[in-house]
Image (cartoon, coloured by chain):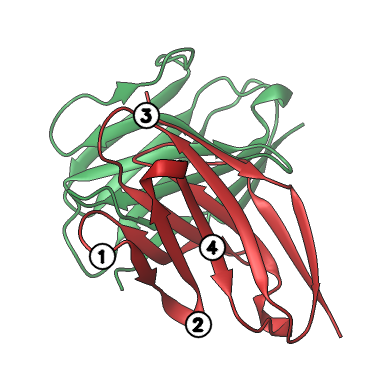
Chain colours: A green, B red
């Protein structure tokens, strides 16, 4: 199956700073990538859909100015959490999608904001 | 919008016993349905998927699921549980995920 990587796997940052998370499709070109947030013992919540070369589409309730998504190439999408606060601490997961909505997931990034 | 509901946040079975994880969906259009498995500290992996065609779908590791339109269900089964099956399982629609079911397998 297709391989998707995320970097970093775990990051700790101070409140008020920004953090960038990278999502790469290693062996295929991903025109569409998705970003999810997963709270402890809860399901995945779709944050945004990222299409290569265009602006991301954010789900209702997700602050686009806080969660900046860039999909500059067919193999890389980035999520930047700006001015992070403790409530942004979570597990962030990216995936690369197919037309049939089958997704290949990255291993996730655990963000802790102190 | 499609919604997915998993019945039971925790399921515990004995090794060798039948595994049954329940999933119901809500949709007015033909669905795309998936089961994913998440092992600790790993990303989600696709177990199986239903798009069109045969309603009984076979996946990896001996799992299968049956799409039942009349019951709006897509339950995941495995005849005989292994210790290595212990993980969290997610039923999903297009971009909507169920709450997850943690499967525990005891000797």
In the foreground, A113 or A110: A110
Discs 2/3, front: 2
Discs 1/3, front: 1
Asked whether the beta carbons under mark 1 and mark 3 sit within 8 Å of each other, the answer is no
Instruction: Give the alpha-carbon distance from disc 2 to disc 3, as whole Å.
Output: 33 Å
Are the residues under marks 2 and 4 on the same chain? yes
Disc number placed over residue B76 in the picture, else none: 4
Where is residue B3? Give x, y as percent: 46, 31
- The image shows residue A84, relative to residue B23, as above or below, that is above
Q: Residue, x 49% and y 59% (percent of image)?
A: B36
**Residue under circle 2?**
B62
Where is residue A88? Give x, y as percent: 64, 27
Discs 4/3, front: 4
Are the residues under marks 2 and 3 on the same chain? no
Query: Dot 2, crowdedness within 10 Å: few (<14), some or many (≥20)?
Result: few
Instruction: Give the alpha-carbon distance from disc 4 to disc 3, as whole Å.
Output: 28 Å
Asked whether the beta carbons under mark 2 and mark 1 sit within 8 Å of each other, the answer is no
Circle nearer the N terminus (2, 1) = 1
Are the residues under marks 2 and 1 on the same chain? yes
Pick out the residue farthest to the front: B70
**Residue under circle 1?**
B54
Asked whether the beta carbons under mark 4 and mark 3 sit within 8 Å of each other, the answer is no
Q: Is residue A86 left or right of residue A21?
A: right
* Secondary-structure class at tag 4: strand
């Amino acid at each position: 199956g297709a391989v998707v990587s995320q970097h970093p796997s775990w990051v700790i940052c101070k409140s008020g700073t920004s953090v960038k998370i990278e999502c790469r499709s290693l062996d295929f070109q991903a025109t569409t990538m998705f970003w999810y947030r997963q709270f402890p013992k809860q399901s995945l919540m779709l944050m945004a859909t990222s299409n290569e070369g265009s602006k991301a589409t954010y789900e209702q309730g997700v602050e686009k100015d806080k969660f900046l998504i860039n999909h500059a190439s067919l193999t890389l999408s980035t999520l930047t959490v700006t001015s992070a606060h403790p409530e942004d601490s979570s597990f962030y997961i990216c995936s690369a999608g197919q037309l049939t909505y089958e997704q290949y997931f990255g291993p996730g990034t655990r963000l802790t904001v102190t | 919008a499609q919604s997915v509901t998993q019945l039971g946040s925790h399921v515990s079975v004995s090794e060798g016993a039948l595994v049954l994880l329940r999933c119901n969906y809500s949709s007015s259009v033909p669905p795309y349905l998936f089961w994913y498995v998440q092992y600790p500290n790993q990303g989600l992996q696709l177990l199986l998927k239903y798009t069109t065609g045969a309603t009984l779908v076979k996946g990896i590791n001996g799992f299968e699921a049956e799409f039942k339109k009349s019951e709006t269900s897509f339950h995941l089964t495995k005849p005989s549980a292994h210790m290595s099956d212990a993980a969290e399982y997610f039923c999903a629609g297009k971009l909507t995920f169920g709450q997850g079911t943690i499967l525990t397998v005891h000797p």
